[in-house]
Image: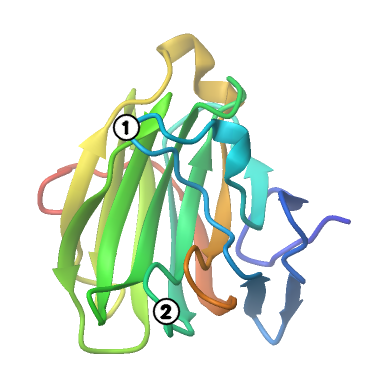
Amino acid sequence: MTLHLDGLPFALAPEGPDGRWSHADSMLTGRAGPGQDLFVPPSGDAPVSATDTPRLLGAVGDGDFRLLARVRPGLVAPGDAGALHLHLHLGDHDWAKLCLEHSSGLATVCSVVTRGHSDDANAFVVEDDSYWLRLSRTGDAYAFHASADGETWTFVRVFTLGTAEQRAAARVGFLVQSPTGEGCGAVFDRIAFLPGGVENLRDGR
């Protein structure tokens, strides 16, 4: 099964467990089951194959881009989240996600970059139940930004993943997780894919 969204120039295909993905009225919805997550502990306590969660991804090809969406996850248990996701065709060891996540009882913008093992970084707490997320590529650099209104963007992090030769292998899309809970649903809307990267990675313009 593939999904074709009006705001994206590429098809999306599901990966991982069944996310019950659907698209109607310009809204994409997905759901993670109990205990589903994509995270490789830095301690090395769990193999990559031990974690998986529903993802919906499409091949972005070469060139700079910005993928953005407003996400509204049902945040109930710690770690529940809806996210934008970046994955390279290098195996399960190279990926990143930008989440609106339940962290310490609060809706928090969080990010993870995995190169063999995952890091984990909280950016800031938000007051609303929905928030804009953006994943961009500018040259060899990827960047995460978040926004309350989809206009003014706050810098979360910048990073590289893979090599310049592997740029065209990137897939991007959406992810839902519920590592400690009984499941989590998320709604993504205002989805857009724009050509060109971010001129100033720090201020998000």
Q: Give the residue type at disc 2.
A: Ala
Residue 195 visible here = yes
Residue 61 is left or right of residue 95, and the answer is right
Q: Secondary structure at mark 2?
A: loop
Disc with the residue nearer the chain's start (1 vs 2): 1
Q: In which quadrant of the rendered image does the C terminus lie? A: bottom left
- The answer to whether 80 is drawn above or below residue 37 in the figure is below
Give percent across and percent down for residue 73: 47, 80
Q: Nearer the viewer, mark 1 or mark 2?
A: 1
Q: Which mark is residue 77?
A: 2
Task: Report the residue at 33% width, 77% height from top.
Answer: 131
Image quadrant in which you'd find residue 7: bottom right
Crowdedness near tag 1: few (<14), some (14–19) or many (≥20) residues, C-alpha within 10 Å:
few
Give percent across and percent down for residue 55: 64, 54
Q: Which mark is residue 203?
A: none
Give percent across and percent down for residue 111: 30, 52
Name the outermost residue toward the right: 1
**Distance CA(mark 1)–CA(mark 2):** 23 Å
Residue 173 is left or right of residue 78, and the answer is right
Give percent across and percent down for residue 140: 34, 23
Task: Report the residue at 28% width, 89% height from top.
Answer: 128
Q: Give the residue type at disc 1.
A: Ser
- Residue named by callout 1: 43
Judge by depth and name the residue closer to the eye, 73 or 142.
73
Task: Report the residue at 22% width, 75% height from top.
Answer: 104
- The answer to whether 141 is drawn above or below residue 193 in the figure is above
Crowdedness near tag 2: few (<14), some (14–19) or many (≥20) residues, C-alpha within 10 Å:
some
